[in-house]
Structures are given as C-alpha cells and as structure tokens.
Image: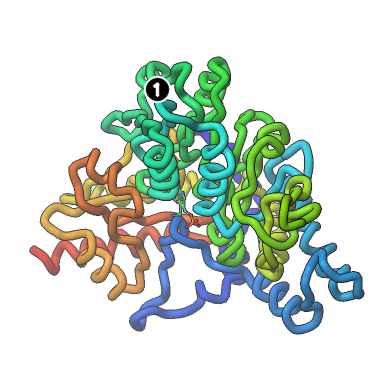
C-alpha cells in the first residue's frame, strides 16, 4: 500500500457523515453500511440543495440566450469548468470538456482521435486491469480500422509488468489507455512513469481517472497525460456528467464526436465549420444542472481536502485489509503495494452473489459481480468477486460491521 500524507486533526468523519442524508437510513432494518462508493458515491446536502435551487429558482438554458436567467446559468455552468481546471491543474479552462461520464469521454477520444489518427496495422495498448469502458471503445475502433489491441499483463498482486509494457511500445503504437486506479482490484498504476515511457516514443496517453480523481490530488501537468477522464457521480456529484481533459494541440487536431447545435461556427448545406474547443465537443443542450451540481461537489471535496480524503481512505484500506485477512476462508484479490481503498474478495465455497445478498441482509452494501472488468476476473481465475470500496465518509466501525456480516455469512454456509 502506498504511503500517504498525514490526516489533518480537523478531519471529523462523524461531522462529514451528517452531510450525507442517505448514510443515516436503514436497510433491511439495520443501519446502512455503504461500501459501494467505487460504483457511485453518495451525495451531500450541498449538492442536492444546489441542484434544487437551480431547478426551482434559476433554471434556464446556457449559451444560446441573452436574457438574465440564461446569462446567470451560463456563468454558473462555466464556473464549474474553471473549478475542474483548477482541480486537475489544467493549464487552460478550454481544455476541460463536459461529457456524460468516463465512458463517453473515452468514446469521444476513440472517435475524435482514433478515427482520424489510427489506421490499418496500428496498435492501441490497454492494460489487463481495465474497466470495459476502457476496452470496448478501443476494440470497436480496432475492428473498424484493422488495428490491433495489445494488453499490458499484470502480476499476481495486480501490478502492471512494466518491462512487458515497454516491449509493447513501438512505431505502430498510436495511443496507450490505462486506468489510474483499477476499479476491480484497487491497484494504483504508475501512470506518470508509463506516460514518460510512451512520450519518449511519441505515443499519446489517456488516463481513465474514474477511480482516482475523487480520491486523491491529480495534476495533469505533472502527469503530462494527453487525456484524463472521470465521472461526476463517483465524486459526490450527480449522474450524467463527466470530464474529459485534453492537451490543446491534440483537442484542436481531433474531429468532433457528436454533431449538432452549439458545436459549430457556421453551417451551410455545403460545409460546416466547428466552434473552438471546448465547444467543438459539446453538441446539444448540456446537462446544465448536473454541471452546476458537479461544481458544488468539487467545492465540497476541496473543502475537506483531497489530501485528507486520501489519508483517511488509506487508513480505512489498511484497517479493512487487516479485518478481512483475519477471517478464515476470505481471499483478497489484488494485493498491490500501491492500492486505493478498494478490497475485492472471495469466500471459499460461497458465490459472490450470495455474499452480496447475505451482506445486504445485514445492511452492508457491497458490489458483487465482475465489476465490468471480465478480463481481470479471468486473469485471477474467478467469475466474480465481492468488492468493498470505501470513501472518506466511511468509518472503521463500518468495517467491523462488514467483518461481522462476513463471519455470519460463512456460518450460514457452514
Ligand atoms: N472506468 C473505471 C475505472 C470505472 O470504475 C468506471 C465506473 N465503474 C468507468 C470507467 C465507467 O464510468 P461511467 O459508468 O461513470 O461512465
């Protein structure tokens, strides 16, 4: 597990929990223990209230109209773009593109970059730990273009084998696309080092930050990635909104993904010219309230401090790993040295779906399944796992509840 910065003495998890209405509810007659934040995070009052206020008092469209409400909505909407640029330390605000989520961000790059710059015989490199969102769009592109998808292997702990990665990079490689953190097994991949290796050969690099941006400080200039994508709903924001960051030169060179209103400069039946970035990639009426809600979510996370979030989640990971390791029959899948607060596990003789159901009876919400990462499940010879994923609003007492619920599950099947 990676070393983390110290937790600020002002960090108060009980105070934070009070910001999240869902965390106070019961499930199946037991207090909810929500350990599924890698799938989606809970929402604080601040975000819910901001979106309600927008819909009830300020609602209007953005960009198209000059009336007061529209001007104010546009201001709030563009305010989020500035907040995201600051969050990621992007050099310029126009490098931030609003998408529907990580999935759309990757598809946008696969279309806008891939269709233009990838040809027959070219290669695209992904890793063995990727989410389907960072496999399937590239595979579709390869099928269309006659290109080849190549895969960086992992060792038994879930760490990418960098010597093999280096061997995969060649003059045919057009882009590398790797998750910053694996959603299925929690590995934090050494993307900065991997990006430098790709750039040494003139190869572009996309980072899927869905599991990283909400949990740690991300600096796109320090990483030097060409693209970085994440989803708002995993970062205390609403669903339906995501971010694509890109370097200016490549965003400008790329073709648009979707055509329509707001992404054009001029249209005739003979020819259309496109708006400058970021609008070139934002066709149609956007998810206005969701963008504004995401802005509030970012302010909320920054109020707690991403370094505090990372430090507390790391404590939870260490505690959770200890609690689960002490239970006979439990096997943790993914034991990388650098890990985020995600613990995938199996229990001898019990199907993960049964684990999920029995834990739910105890009020403990975990995910059970292949986590949209079937190749990584295949790599470890399991069809599925149960996965407990922690956020800064979780407590050690909740991990104890998970441990007790697992012991009870094992007794049921004994
Ligand atoms: N990549 C990773 C690593 C993820 O964890 C997820 C969501 N589970 C995605 C991509 C897809 O994100 P979304 O469904 O929000 O588009």
Residue 369 pos. (x, y %): 28, 58
Residue plotted at (45% across, 55% down): 38
**Is 69 placed left or right of 137 in the picture?**
right
Give x and y (percent) for residue 160.
Answer: 37, 29
Q: Which residue is mark 1?
A: 165
Viewer-nearest residue: 94 or 128: 94
Q: Residue furthest left?
A: 414
Query: Looking at this view, is 116 or 127 the one in front?
Result: 116
Q: Work out whether residue 106 can be spotted.
A: yes
Residue 180 locus on image (x, y percent)? 50, 39
Residue 289: which quarter of the image? bottom right
Whether the residue under disc 1 has CB within 8 Å of ligand 1: no
Q: Quadrant of residue 255?
A: top right
Image quarter hosting the N terminus: top left
Q: Is residue 125 left or right of residue 393?
A: left
Against 274, residue 352 (above or below) is below
Coordinates of residue 23 in the picture (x, y in percent): 50, 72
Say left or right for 82 vs 183. right
Neighbourhood count class around disc 1 (C-alpha, 10 Å): few under 14, some 14–19, many 20 upward:
many
Residue lying at 51% horizontally and 49% vertically, measured from the top left:
107
Residue placed most toward the observer, 210 or 285: 285
Q: Dot 1: what SS?
A: helix
Name the residue rendered at 52%, 46% in the picture: 106
Q: Is residue 124 above or below residue 322?
A: above
What's the residue at 66%, 39% (across, down)?
246
Quadrant, the C terminus: bottom left
Determine whether, in the image, residue 191 is placed left or right of residue 184: right
> Does 331 sit above or below residue 350?
above
Q: Is residue 235 visible?
A: no
């Amino acid at each position: 597990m990676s070393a983390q910065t110290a937790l600020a003495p002002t960090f108060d998890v009980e105070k934070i929990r009070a910001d999240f209405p869902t965390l106070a509810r019961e499930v199946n007659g037991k207090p909810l223990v929500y350990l599924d934040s890698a799938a989606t995070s809970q929402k604080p009052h601040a975000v819910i209230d901001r979106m309600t206020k927008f819909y009830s008092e300020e609602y209007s469209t953005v960009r198209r109209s000059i009336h007061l409400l529209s001007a104010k909505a546009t201001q709030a909407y563009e305010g989020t773009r500035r907040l995201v640029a600051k969050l990621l330390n992007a050099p310029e605000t126009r490098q931030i593109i609003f998408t529907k989520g990580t999935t759309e961000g990757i598809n946008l790059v696969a279309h806008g970059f891939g269709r233009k710059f990838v040809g027959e015989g070219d290669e695209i490199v992904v890793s063995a730990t990727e989410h389907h969102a960072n496999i399937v769009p590239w595979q579709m592109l390869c099928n269309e273009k006659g290109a080849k998808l190549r895969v960086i292997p992992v060792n038994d702990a879930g760490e990418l084998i960098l010597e093999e990665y280096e061997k995969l990079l060649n003059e045919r490689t057009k882009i590398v696309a790797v998750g910053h953190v694996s959603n299925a097994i929690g590995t934090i991949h050494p993307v900065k080092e991997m990006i430098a290796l790709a750039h040494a050969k003139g190869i572009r690099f996309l980072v899927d930050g869905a599991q990283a941006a909400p949990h740690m400080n991300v600096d796109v200039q320090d990483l030097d990635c060409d693209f970085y994508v994440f989803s708002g709903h995993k970062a205390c924001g609403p669903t339906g909104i995501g971010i694509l960051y890109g370097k200016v030169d490549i965003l400008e060179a790329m073709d648009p993904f979707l055509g329509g209103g707001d992404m054009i400069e001029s249209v005739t039946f003979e020819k259309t010219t496109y708006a400058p970035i970021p609008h070139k990639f934002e066709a149609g009426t956007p998810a206005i309230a969701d963008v504004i809600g995401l802005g509030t979510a970012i302010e909320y996370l920054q109020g707690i401090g991403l370094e505090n979030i990372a430090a507390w989640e790391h404590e939870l990971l260490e505690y959770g790993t200890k609690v689960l390791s002490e239970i006979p029959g439990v096997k943790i899948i993914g034991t990388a040295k650098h890990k985020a607060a995600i613990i995938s596990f199996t229990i001898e003789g019990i199907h993960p779906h049964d684990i999920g159901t029995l834990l739910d009876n105890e009020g403990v919400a975990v995910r059970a399944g292949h986590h949209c990462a079937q190749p990584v499940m295949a790599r470890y010879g399991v069809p599925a796992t149960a996965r407990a994923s922690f956020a800064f609003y979780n407590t050690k007492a909740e991990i104890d509840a998970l441990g007790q619920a697992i012991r009870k599950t094992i007794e049921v099947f004994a």
